[in-house]
Amino acid sequence: MTERELRGLIEAVRKGSITRRQFVGTMLGVGIAAPIAGQLLMHAGIAQAQPASTYKGTKRGGGGALKVLWWQGATLLNPHFATGTKDQDGSRIFYEPLAGWDTEGNLIPVLAAETPTPANGGVSRDGKSITWKLKRDVQWHDGKPFTSADVVFNWEYAADPATSAVTIGSYKDVVATAVDAYTVRVDYKKASPFWADPFVGTRGMLIPKHLFEAYKGAKSRDAPNNLKPVGTGPYKFDSFTPGDMVRGTLNANYHMPNRPFFDTIEMKGGGDAVSAARAVLQTGEFDYAWNLQVEDEILAKLEQGGKGRVVIIPGGDIEFIQFNFTDPWNEVDGERASIKSKHPLFTDPAVREAMNLLIDRDSVQKFIYGRTGIATANFVNNPPKYRSPNNKFEFNVDKANQVLETAGWKKGSDGIREKGGKKLKVVYQTSVNQPRQKAQAIVKQAAQKAGIDIELKTVTASVFFSSDFANPDVYTKLFCDMQMYTTTMTQPDPEIFMNQYVSWEISSKANKWQGRNVTRWTSDEYDKAYRDAEGELDPVKRTALFIKMNDLVIQNRVIVPLVSRPRVRASNLKLKVPESGWDSDFWALQDWYRDA
Amino acid sequence: MTLPGTYVLRRLLIALPSLLGISIVLFTVLALAPGDPFGDIVSNPNIPADVAANLRLKFGMDDPVAVRYLRWLTAMLQGDWGFSFASRIDVDTLIMQRLWTTLLVIGSSQVLALLIALPVGIYAATRPYSLFDQVANTLTFIGFSLPTFFTGLLLILVFSIQLDWLPFVYRSDISATGWRFFWEHFRQTIMPVSVLALFQAASWTRYVRSAALDVIRLDYVTTARSKGLKERVVIMKHVVRNALIPVVTLVALQLPAIFGGAIVTEQIFRVPGIGSLLISAILANDTPVIMAVTFVFSCLVISFNLLADILYGWLDPRISLR
C-alpha cells in the first residue's frame, strides 16, 4: 500500500464513506497493527470515537468471585520488575497505567482524563512533548490522592539505573515534569512518532510515591510494598503466594462508576496448559485461563464440554523460518557465521525462492495450528494497518524445481541437486515442541521432492531460547542453515519489531550474540527506511515505510513467515471480557462481568 | 539400652563433612548448568542490556564460583538463606508459605498409607495364600506399578470430569469459613492424598506382610499359641511388635520426603507445596531457592538416617551401637 492510497483511505473515513472499523480492518490486511491504524486517524485529526464500553453492570460488586488460571503463576507484584506477562498481569490487577490499548489499537484512557492528541494540544507539533491530563479524585487503595507527583515519581524510579527496573527502556530517554497537580508533560529527546510507551500499557503501571519513595534506587528490593501492592485498580490487595496465588477484593473507592462487578478475584498459578483449558472449558472450575499453547484439536474437543469457549485474540507474534546469510560451518577470524563470510547456498536468491515455494503454509495451518496459527505471507501482520497487501504465498513443488533448474542446480545420482560441487544439503533447527517438529517434517518432505536434502535438528527450548552464550545452539547464534521460532511483538508499534533486519543489530561475537538481526542479512535500502521511520512524524508516511520494510524482507526471501500466532485464551461462556492483543489480559479488568 | 552419647556425637561429626560435600556438589552443578535467571530480561528487546548486567552485579552473580559459594555458606551459617532471583523474596519466607500445605498433603498421605499398609499387610500374613492375600498381593503390584501421574490423571478424569464430584485444582487459601472451610479443604485433598497414599501403601503393604511372615513362623509364636493365648493377643503383642521393627526404620527414612513434597503429583493437582516451588525454581534457574530446598532436604535425609539408626537400637536391644 502506498502513501497515496493510505491518504485516500483516511480521507474516506473522514467523509464517512468507510467506517473506522473498516479502515482498521483494511489496514490489518496490509500488516499494520490496529494501534497504529488508530494513531493514523488520530493524527489526521479524525476524532477517535470513544469506543463504547461493553460493560453492562449496573452496580459495584455483587458478582461473586472471579477465578482465573495462569499456568505460570505471578512471581512478583511490582510492575517495574515484571519481566514476563504473568508478572505484568498479576500487577495489573492492582496497578493501572495512564492509558491502555484496546484490541483495535485505540489508546483508551485509564488514569488519564483524555488521550493526548494534536487536536486537544496533548501532542506538540514537533512531536517532542506530550501533555497528559490526569483524572481528578482518583485515590490509592490507602486513601491517599493520586496526583502528577506520583506520575513523575514513577519516571524517576524507573529511570534510575540503580533501581534495575525492567521498564527502564521506556523511561530513561524521557523527562517527566509536573505542570500542575493534575497535568504531566513528558519531553522526548527526539521527535517520537510512537510516544505512547512511557506510562502506557504493561510498561506504564504506576506505583504510589508515598510508599515507594524511600526505596528508589539500590534499595528497591527492600520495599515492603513490593509484596503488598497499593494501587488505584479495581481490586485491592488481599494475599500473595509467589508462583501460586494472587487474591484481591473489590475496591469500594474505584474511580469508574459501578465497577468492578466481582467481589473478589483469584489468580491461581501452576500446572500445565492442557489442564488449565480443561478447568475452564470442561469442568467450569475456573472462569478464565491464560495462554493456552495447546493443539487446536485438543481445544476443540475440550470446548465440547460446553462450559466455556476458546478466545482467539489477534496479535503480532509470528512463527517464521530464517535463512542464514553467513557461513555457519567455517570459521572466519575464529568466528562461525562471521559477517565477513557468505552462506554457500542461500546467497543464491534462487535457492531461497525455491525454499519459499516449498513451504506449505496452508497445510501447516490446517494440520498443525488450526485456529491458533494463521498462515501468512507477511512478517508484520498486526495491527492490520501495517500488513502489506503486496505479498502472497504459494506452495508449488514444480515451480521450485523449475527455479532451481534454471539457476543451474542439477540433480545428482542421489536425487540431490548440486552446482559447482556444492550439494543442496541444509540443516534446519528449531526448539523441541510438537507442532514445530510436525512443521519441520512438512517442509522436509516437500524439499525432498525438489532435490533439497534437509537435515532436521531440535534443541531443548531452555537451551535454544537461553542467553547462555557459551552454547552453540542458542537461536541468536544461528549456527546452522535455517531455523524456525516465534518472534514476539510486544508493542503495537513495529519500530522495535522491525529492528530485526537492520545492519547495526547483527548478532555477532562482538556483541555476545545479543544483536537482534539473526539472519545477518543487510540492505542499505532497509537501513535507510528504518532510520527514516524512526523520526517520521507523519503516521501515514511512517506506515508506508514499515510496509516497505516488510516487503523488502519478504520479497528478498530473507525469511519465510509461516503462521501468525494470535493469543489463545479460554473463557467461561457467561464471562464477558474486553480482550486486547496489545496489552495485558487485565487491561480492562474493571469491565469484566458475568451475564446472568 | 542406654542412648550412646558418644555414638550420636560421632555420627553428627561425620554428618558435617557430608553436608559440606553435598552443598559443594549442589552449588557447583547449579553454577555449571546452562541457563540464566535473567534470560527473559536479556532476550526482551524492550529492556536495555545493562539492566540484566546491573542485576547480575547487584546479586553478585559474576563473581567466581568459589567466592559465590563461600558467600552463600557464610550467610547460610548465619541463618540467612538468601532471596529468590525470580520473586526477590527471602527464600525462608517462600518455603514457610508452602510448608503447611506440603505437610498437610504429603503428611496425611503417609498416614493414610500406613493405615492401609499395616492392617492389610498383617492380615495377609496371618492367612498366607488365602483369597484375601492373593487379592491384596495383586492390588499392591498394580499399585506400585502405576506411576502417580497416571493414577492422578485417571482420578481427575473419573471424579472431576465424568462425575463432577471433586475439584482438581488445589487452592491453599479457601475463602469459606467454619465447617465449609474444612469440607472444601477435605474435598480438594481427597485426590492428591489418595494418589500418593495408594502408591506408598502398595509398597509398604508388601513390606509389612513379609516382615510379619518372617516372625509368624518363629518358635516363640508357636509357644505363645500353645500357652493358650487368644489369637488376637498373639498377633498384636507378639507378632506385630517384632515385625514392626524393620517397618519403623523404613517409614522413618521415608519421612524427609514429606518436606520435599511430591513434584509430579503437586504439578498435576496444582498443589502449592515445596515440590512445585522446587520445580518452578529449577525452570527459572532460581539458584538460591534450588539450593535452599535441596540442601534442607539433604539435611533431613541425613538426620533421619541417624534417627532411624538410633531408633533401631532402641526397638531391638540386641543391636548395639558403638
Image: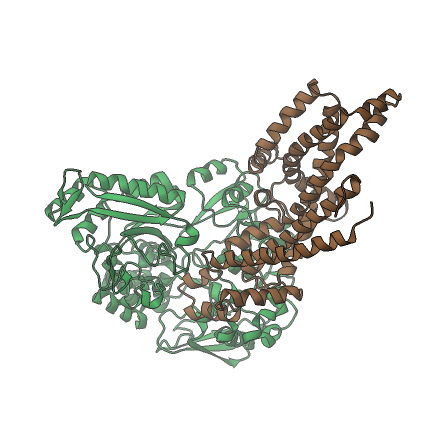
Chain colours: A green, B brown
- Left or right position of A321 against A230: left
Q: Position of residue B125 (x, y in %)?
A: 73, 25
- Regarding residue A255, the answer to whether it shows in the image is no
Camera-side residue: B242 or A55?
B242
User: B177 or B251: which is nearer to us?
Assistant: B251
Q: Is B205 in front, or is B273?
A: B205
Does residue B278 sit above or below A216 in this rendering? above
Q: In this orientation, does residue A107 appear?
A: yes
Q: Quadrant of the N terminus of chain A?
A: bottom left
Left or right: B211, with A475 as reference point: right
Which residue does the image show at 60% across and 76% down from the upper left? Answer: A214
| Residue A440 in which image quadrant | top left
Q: Which residue lies furthest to the right in this view?
A: B228
The front one of A538 and B45 is B45
Place of residue A367 in the rendered image (x, y in percent of width and height, measured from the top left): 35, 38
- How many numbered marks, from 0 up? 0
Placement of the C terminus of chain A among the 4 image quadrants = top right
Q: Position of residue A467 (x, y in %)?
A: 41, 60
Q: In the displayed orientation, state which residue is furthest to the front.
A: B322
Location of residue A196 with respect to B276 vertically, above or below? below
User: Is residue B13 found left or right of A184 in the rendered image?
Assistant: right
Name the spot of residue A374 as percent of width and height, x first: 35, 46
